[in-house]
């Protein structure tokens, strides 16, 4: 009893405002960096395709660029297999510190790799290596930061705390969009094509340094220290996950499908779609994306707090229903070609994405006990992202190319939304329960 009491006492200071802000910032900063890096890759996909792949077929080059984008996601489950158990055994903080270092290395590489014209086939190979490093670190980041934030939260604020994980991903995308827009507006097309796009990647290193400092200054989560102090740390978290929680891991994968596909289509693929398919200027595509991201970021903590009052499941299912019903008509409006007609549908898509993204981290974390939470939600989520989210831009591009229908990406979005809706029907809402 005395050990548990001491842990409860340690938990009290985490309710003061200063410590709350530090915990949220430390848990979120790596996501800002991660999604900044991943977003600028999507924003500059058409430029990257020209520099790292042979000239001749622009569609094939763009597909190759998105394939490399997808390869980074394939490494996410491997990263979660390594860092998920590490975070369950030694703590969330150390795993998160390592993930932010690896992300910085991958980002720096993309910023300095010579072009295909300069070094031939070595250019796309090095690009793949950089993306694999980023994907590996991302596999550690998502589960670790989600566990960190949710385990710092009191029961009645887990949705709000967890939502900052997704706030930070939106902030990273927003920051990437701002930097990309400023670079595009400030440079001539020649300078942008020659070297300007590289600046966006090199700026990301600053976030890595800040993130490492913040994480090393924080204590580990109260829930993990409670487990550590009572000597209940899982020594073989992967084995425990496989033998005790296989159904929950499968639920986590299904849970993630609509979430990740709708996220990447809405915030990463649409700028490229608006430019290459709708034939609007890159500046207009980036400007609309910036406005929508700002709207999304503002919504996230509000919807996260709402999930603490009404539950997670209602909001999650509303999101899936929204994408299943509205994806097709929203893309139809986007293809009208005016700035207003691309902006309004993006507002609608971002709203329904917020209904999932805000309560999603807490809902997923609540499925698993503290002993194996980092491993289980990391692996479940990252398998879903690797199979469905990372491939979404490539699949969307392929569908348009093969069907010659500008609306064909919506079929993928709708199908994924329906699958996750049925997964959610069998999931218990634990928003009022204490974490195991």
Image (cartoon, rainbow, N blue to C red):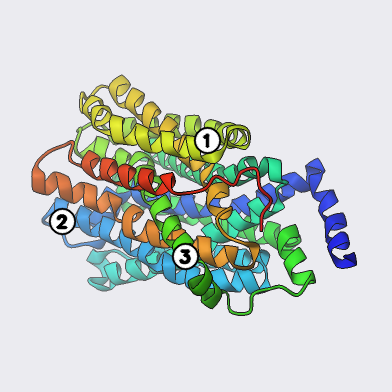
| Residue at image mark 2 | 60
SS label for mark 3? helix
Residue 84 position, x and y percent, is 55, 69
Asked whether residue 191 appears in the rendered view, the answer is: no
Residue 434 position, x and y percent, is 69, 51
Near-viewer residue (160 or 56): 160
Marks 2/1: CA–CA distance:
34 Å
- Of the two numbered discs 2 and 1 on the same chain, state the one appearing first in sequence: 2
Quadrant housing the C terminus: bottom right
Instruction: Note whether 374 is above or below 188 in the view shown.
Output: below
| Residue at image mark 1 | 297
Quadrant housing the N terminus: bottom right
3 vs 1, front mark: 3
Residue 25 position, x and y percent, is 67, 48
SS label for mark 2? helix
Instruction: Note whether 190 is above or below 248 in the view shown.
Output: above
Hey, which quadrant is residue 92 in on the image?
bottom right
Residue 43 position, x and y percent, is 35, 45
**Left or right, 204 with reference to 272:** right
Residue name at image x 54 percent, y 41 percent: 359
Marks 3/1: CA–CA distance:
26 Å
SS label for mark 1? helix
> What label does residue 379 carry, if any?
3
């Amino acid at each position: 009893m005395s050990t548990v009491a001491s842990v409860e006492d340690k938990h009290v200071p985490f309710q003061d405002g200063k410590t709350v802000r530090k915990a949220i910032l430390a848990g979120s900063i790596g996501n800002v960096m991660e999604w900044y890096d991943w977003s600028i890759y999507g924003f500059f996909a058409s430029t990257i395709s020209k520099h790292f792949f042979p000239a001749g077929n622009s569609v094939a080059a763009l597909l190759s660029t998105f394939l490399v984008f997808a390869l980074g996601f394939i490494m996410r489950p491997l990263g979660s297999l390594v860092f998920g158990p590490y975070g369950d055994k030694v703590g969330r903080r150390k795993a998160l510190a390592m993930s932010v270092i690896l992300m910085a290395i991958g980002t720096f590489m993309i910023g300095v790799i010579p072009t295909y014209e300069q070094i031939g086939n070595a250019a796309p190979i090095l690009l793949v290596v950089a993306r694999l490093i980023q994907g590996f670190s991302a596999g550690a980041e998502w589960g670790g930061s989600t566990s960190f934030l949710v385990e710092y939260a009191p029961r009645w604020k887990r949705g709000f705390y967890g939502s900052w994980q997704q706030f930070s991903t939106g902030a990273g995308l927003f920051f990437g969009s701002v930097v990309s827009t400023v670079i595009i507006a400030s440079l001539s097309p020649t300078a942008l094509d020659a070297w300007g796009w590289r600046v966006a990647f090199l700026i990301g290193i600053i976030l890595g340094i800040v993130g490492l400092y913040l994480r090393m200054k924080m204590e580990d989560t109260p829930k993990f220290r409670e487990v550590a102090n009572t000597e209940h740390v899982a020594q073989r978290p992967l084995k425990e996950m496989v033998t005790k929680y296989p159904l929950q891991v499968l639920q986590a994968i299904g849970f993630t499908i609509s979430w990740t596909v709708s996220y990447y289509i809405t915030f990463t693929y649409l700028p490229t779609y608006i430019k290459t398919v709708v034939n609007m200027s890159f500046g207009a595509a980036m400007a609309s994306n910036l406005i929508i991201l700002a709207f999304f970021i503002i919504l996230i903590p509000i919807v996260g707090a709402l999930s603490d009052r009404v539950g997670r499941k209602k909001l999650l299912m509303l999101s899936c229903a929204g994408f299943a019903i509205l994806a097709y008509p929203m893309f139809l409006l986007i293809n009208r070609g005016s700035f207003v007609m691309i902006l309004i549908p993006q507002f609608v898509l971002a709203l329904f994405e917020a209904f999932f993204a805000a309560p999603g981290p807490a809902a997923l974390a609540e499925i698993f006990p503290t002993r194996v939470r980092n491993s289980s939600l990391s692996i479940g989520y990252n398998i879903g992202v690797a199979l469905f989210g990372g491939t979404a831009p490539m699949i969307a591009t392929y569908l348009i190319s093969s069907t010659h229908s500008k609306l064909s990406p919506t079929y993928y979005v709708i199908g994924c939304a329906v699958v996750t809706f049925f997964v959610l029907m069998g999931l218990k809402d634990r928003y009022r329960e204490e974490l195991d």
